[in-house]
Image (cartoon, rainbow, N blue to C red):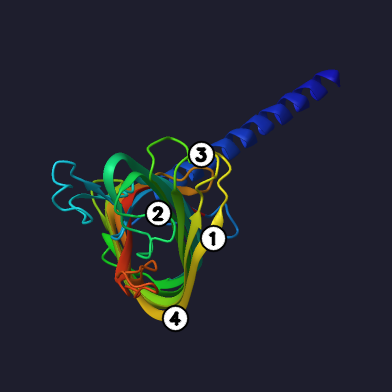
């Protein structure tokens, strides 16, 4: 009987091994089929989201490396000492301007697809600041009120200025996917846009050369220009398959927004101030509020690389170059004559951002 039990145990173990082997072969075959489905080199790849009960989601995060493009960032005229005696009291030399450099930003987005429709949200943040300055003789200031309430702006020894800009943009977007014979897709889209762009210029003029404001007659000028805008936009984007996992993509959109603008111009007498603690009497303060229709557009082009399914997520890497433009904006408050009140120079300007971006995307 003991021998029979041993034979029965061996048979049961053999059956278990056969069952485990059969299960292993089945899992291997299923994984092989799934791997084939995830092959991005397949001209018509199938979905790889069978292990996720909630598919159709996608998300991306972008690193932005943009540069600000705008005019009207002058702060002084560097006078020519060889000719200043001939043209006394008049600017004669090179106009000095702030030159924005590239700074980093971030953009994140989350979208949900329903058949060929998709909708989602996107948030963009970018901030930059740049400064410049000159010292010497016969420097002419360009940002102060012509009444010369504190110092004369036509015979300076120091001029220094700093420009700051901050963009916060929130997009709500919906689109429809048209597939083009499995070689790519075209997606028309439309959405609503909320944007806040704050700009400021802080400039110091001094009649005595030095690194501090402890001596001499000095003026500090603070200028602000803030925009809060809401509007609609529409556009077209698409991708085209290239060699295996590498593809080409592009995007263009245009929109109109209603913007509320708040501008402010203040000048302070900081002649007696000390370095690190700039205080003084405000001698001029002007404010302006207005509403205006603002056109805006964007253009993007780049390359994308699709990665095979990993942990039930399809990953995507992209790198590209993009342009963004806000057109016909009011400029900083400016006074353009020698009268005591001064006439306002009502200039228009455009504000642009352009540069590289790198994207990590995921679909699940």
Decide: marks 1, 3 in contact (CB < 8 A)?
Answer: no
Q: Say which quarter of the image contains residue 80.
A: top left
The kind of secondary structure element at disc 1 is strand
User: In which quadrant of the rendered image does the N terminus lie?
Assistant: top right
Q: Residues within 10 Å of mark 4 (few under 14, many from 20)?
A: some
Against 327, residue 219 (above or below) is above
Against 1, residue 358 (above or below) is below
Label 4 to label 2: alpha-carbon separation? 34 Å
Q: Which residue is mark 3?
A: 214
Q: Going from the N terminus, do you reach mark 1 or mark 2 first?
A: 2
Q: Which residue is mark 4?
A: 291
Q: Going from the N terminus, do you reach mark 1 or mark 3 first?
A: 3
User: Residue lying furthest top in this view?
Assistant: 3
Q: Nearer the viewer, residue 107 or 291?
A: 291
The kind of secondary structure element at disc 3 is loop
x and y, in percent, of residue 320 in the image: 30, 50
x and y, in percent, of residue 337 in the image: 30, 70
Q: Going from the N terminus, do you reach mark 3 or mark 2 first?
A: 2
Question: Which of pointers 3 and 4 indicates the residue nearer the eye?
Answer: 3
Q: Is residue 307 left or right of residue 268?
A: left
Q: Nearer the viewer, residue 226 or 364?
A: 226
Q: Residues within 10 Å of mark 1 (few under 14, many from 20)?
A: some
Q: Residues within 10 Å of mark 3 (few under 14, many from 20)?
A: some
Q: Which mark is residue 151?
A: 2
Question: Which of pointers 4 and 2 indicates the residue nearer the eye?
Answer: 2
Label 1 to label 2: alpha-carbon separation? 14 Å
Q: Which mark is residue 282?
A: 1
Label 3 to label 4: alpha-carbon separation? 41 Å
x and y, in percent, of residue 27 in the image: 55, 41
């Amino acid at each position: 009987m003991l021998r029979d039990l041993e034979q029965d145990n061996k048979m049961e173990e053999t059956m278990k091994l056969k069952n485990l082997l059969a299960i292993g072969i089945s899992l291997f075959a299923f994984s092989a089929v799934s791997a084939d489905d995830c092959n991005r080199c397949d001209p018509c790849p199938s979905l790889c989201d069978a292990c996720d009960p909630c598919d159709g989601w996608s998300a991306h995060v972008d690193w932005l490396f943009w540069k600000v493009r705008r005019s009207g960032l002058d702060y002084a005229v560097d006078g020519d000492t060889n000719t200043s005696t001939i043209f006394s009291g008049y600017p004669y030399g090179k106009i000095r301007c702030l030159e924005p450099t590239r700074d980093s930003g971030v953009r994140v987005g989350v979208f949900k697809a329903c058949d060929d429709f998709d909708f989602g949200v996107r948030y963009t943040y970018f901030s930059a600041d740049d400064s410049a300055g000159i010292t010497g003789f016969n420097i002419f200031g360009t940002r102060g009120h012509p009444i010369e309430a504190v110092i004369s702006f036509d015979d300076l020894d120091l001029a220094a200025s700093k420009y700051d800009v901050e963009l916060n943009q929130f997009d709500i977007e919906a689109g429809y996917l048209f597939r083009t014979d499995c070689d790519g897709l075209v997606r028309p889209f439309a959405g609503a846009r909320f944007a806040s762009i704050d700009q400021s210029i802080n400039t110091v003029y001094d009649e005595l050369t030095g690194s501090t404001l402890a001596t001499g007659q000095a003026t500090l000028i603070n200028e602000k220009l803030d925009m809060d805008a809401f509007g609609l936009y529409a556009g077209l984007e698409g991708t085209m398959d290239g060699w295996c996992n590498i593809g080409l993509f592009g995007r263009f959109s245009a929109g109109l927004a209603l913007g509320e603008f708040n501008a402010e111009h203040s000048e302070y007498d900081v002649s007696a101030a000390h370095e690190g603690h700039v205080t003084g009497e405000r001698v001029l303060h002007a404010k302006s509020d207005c509403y205006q229709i603002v056109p805006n557009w964007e253009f993007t082009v780049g390359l994308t690389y699709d990665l095979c399914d990993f942990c039930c997520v399809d990953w995507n890497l992209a790198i590209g170059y993009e342009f963004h433009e806000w057109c016909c904006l009011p400029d900083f408050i400016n006074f353009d004559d020698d009268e005591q009140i001064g006439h306002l120079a009502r200039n228009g300007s455009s504000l642009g951002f352009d540069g590289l971006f790198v994207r990590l995307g995921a679909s699940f």
